[in-house]
Image: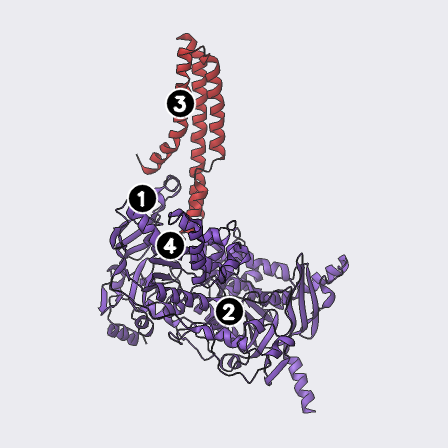
Chain colours: A red, B purple
Amino acid sequence: MNDINRTRIKYVVFPIIALLIIIATSIPLYLFFHFNYRVYIPIIVFMSGIIIMFIGAWWDFGAKKFISDVFKTHMELNEDDLEYVYKQQFIMMLIYIGIGFLYFLIAFIIYLVLPLL
Amino acid sequence: MIETVENKSNIENEMLNVKNFYVNFETYDGIVHALDDINFTLKNNEVLGILGESGSGKTTLATAIMGLLPENAGVKGSITLNGKTYLRENDFNSGKKLNRKQLKILDQNLRNIRWKDISIVFQGAMNSFNPVYTIGKQIREVYKLHTDLSDNEIEEKLLKTIRYAGLNKMVINAHPHELSGGMKQRAVIAMALALDPEIVIADEPTTGLDVITQAEIINQLKALKKQGKIKSMIIISHDIGVISQLADHIMVLYAGKIMEYGTSRDIYLNSQNPYTVELLKSYPSIKNAKKHVEGIPGTLPDPINIPEGCIFYERCIYHDAICKQKEPDITYINNEHYSRCYFASKLTEKERVNTDIDGEPIIGTEKKVETKDLVTYFDLKKSMAGSLFSNKERVVRAVDDINIEINRGEILGIVGESGSGKTTLARTIIGLIKPTAGEIIYNFENTNININKIKQRSKEYSVFRKNTQMIFQDPYDALNPKMTVYDIVAEPIIAHRSTNNPGEMLNMVKSTLKEVNLTPPENYLERFPHELSGGERQRVATARALVLNSELIVADEPTSMLDVSLRAGFMNLIKNLRNKNNLSILYISHDIASVYYLSDKIFVMYLGVGVEYGDSKDIVNNPLHPYTKALIKAVPSPTPDWNPGNIDIIGEIGNSINVPKGCRFYDRCIYKQGKCKNEKPPVQKTGTHWYLCHFTQDELDNIKQYMK
């Protein structure tokens, strides 16, 4: 795996872990208390998915800091470099939107499939 | 009859005439008297230098000539260009506001004058351009606004102007951030010359530039003057050396008043005003060797409450009872030279009483700090964002294989242009940046401390932190504006738990303030940074560094933000403190004259490597490396006779990313040969003086002869 994919995976780790935490932390509540997992968790996961999409759309993924570091260290930054930064930001945004859809999918699975089990 | 003809030709020769000119600013605190009774004439083909400390009214005069004064300015007197008065008493808000029609006419008049007749090179080229437009677009704008030229004609003119300013045409499509400081300054000059104005005003055109770039800009301005591209020029600077190189006549301003006016030779070689004399004395120059320099004590008078009598009275060593009672009139020394002083033409050489430096330095043999093959690289790809957004190698080799040592009581000066790695080296030594490789070994309280090997919670780390302190470049940013002087100076005592006793703490703070000449300390304890002058702030920063009796002080360009009159005082303070407390000091500056004045040894850096090291006298009097030679040659000497000739260096300092494989200086060296490109240069050593080059001095001389 090349460097850039490894970095993208690092960025993806945060929302995936967040998803797992949301799903897992409420399991004890479901098992030991009267917690309606099928009703509440899909809503929470669905709303978190929307938040993840917004994060992907609005977060710069550290691009501003990178550019300021480039300026601080008097490095060259030309149009091609800027285009590359925009491209990477766009890819990351798509990935985060994809993760948002993954959240939606999980929410539907919990809502629709869980009662069948 | 002859007199009438002479007068007529003088008037014809006149470009700009400023007559009985006063500028006041209305503020909430009262009326600020910025300019007071300014009279001068700029002739055709003349360069007038305006010299003075910050706050003396230099820039106000430039903005007044351009008609750019703010709305709260009140004006008296007139400014005439080619016999036509364009700015007079009622043009600005002096009690009554202009109506819309009057404002429109004034604006139209000034628009016709600006850039076509008078243009200005503003201070700080870095901020003069709009960062989102290319240089070409911004210069084209001048033609579009002020002329009716077609696009093709504009393009032709643009190319010519760019070439005149010594720039490549590639610059036209570049954005400001892509250019170096020197190139940006040239581009600003190109913009000012775009419409072939009669007068160019250059407001501090070299401030903030490196010494070599500064020399190149001076040469460029001289060449433009010679070619006739610049007809008349007003050059404003607080740098005595820069003014001496360019001006035919010099006007010395102090608190808005002309203190002395004369030819460049009159002012530098036969100055007849105590202020000019003191200003010249406070300028350290390589020519004056290690001769003692003395700053001017005190500050400029409050511009709201101007004192009666001579405005320089309180700071003047020649003052007499009469000076306080009545303001002196202008005394003519000759036709072209006058001074506003009672003692003009009677001034005798007089030294200040408090010029003594306490004691002699005792330089020990015990090493306080030693670096071994110190390397600091910044790899932007290391961070997550860096590896995502960087499509190429982005490693800055800021410090590469540096070996230095500072003995007890020694001042080591580090010189080099911006981007040579001086500050990174200092920050690495003091532990603010983690080195990539190499060792830094301290000797404090008789223990050797290798800071790469100690833990942050260890006792050694606390000893190391206590004994190393830093004085930062900018005294305006280095002090917390919400803390009083007492809090600022007491902070290290609290952080290092030196004492818990408030009485003892107060005594420590007071004695340190006394040591840095902030006396009586009681007057300063409760003051906030904004209530202090630049020099006082830097002294507070120094007191903070000294309060723990640290053994090593790192001073990173501590005088670069200070006024010329304060620099000398601060340098003497550093010298005094070293002699008294046997401090070891790492002094960083790009001003080789001040480093020479202070330091025992000098280390010259270029693109992250040390290129020469030796005793300061050896380095300055007998530089061996081509870079050091150029650096010393480029330092302007404050005398009109100084002519550096060719500085023997190519272009500007590159970046530390794509450094040459062999000698780092390869791209700029005039002596370069084939092997310099790929082979690392060896150290050529004579005693303690060494330099990094493939060639001996004889070989370098032969190469130069061959080139000739």
Secondary structure, mark 3, is helix
Element type at marker 2? loop
Q: Position of residue A111 (x, y in %)?
A: 46, 13
Q: Is residue B271 left or right of residue B431?
A: right
Locate residue B67 relative to residue B137 in the image: left or right.
Answer: right
Front position among marks 1 and 4: 4
Name the residue beneath numbered marker 4: B548
What quarter of the picture does the C terminus of chain B occupy? Answer: bottom left
Identity, as a three-letter code, of the amino acid under mark 4: Leu
* Amino acid type of the residue tagged 2 in the rendering: Pro
Q: Secondary structure at mark 1?
A: loop
N-term-proximal mark, 1 vs 4: 1
For disc 3, the marked residue is: A21
Q: Give the labeled residue for mark 2.
A: B297
Marks counted in the figure total 4
- In which chain is the residue bearing label 1? B
Real-space Cα distance between discs 2 and 4?
A: 27 Å
Report the amino acid beneath label 1.
Answer: Gln
Disc 3 crowd rating (10 Å Cα; few below 14, some 14-19, many 20+) is few
Chain letter of mark 3 equals: A
Q: N-terminal of the two: label 2 or label 4?
A: 2
Nearer mark to the viewer, of 2 and 4: 4
Vertical relation: B332 (above or below) B651? below
Reply above or below: B347 against B240: below
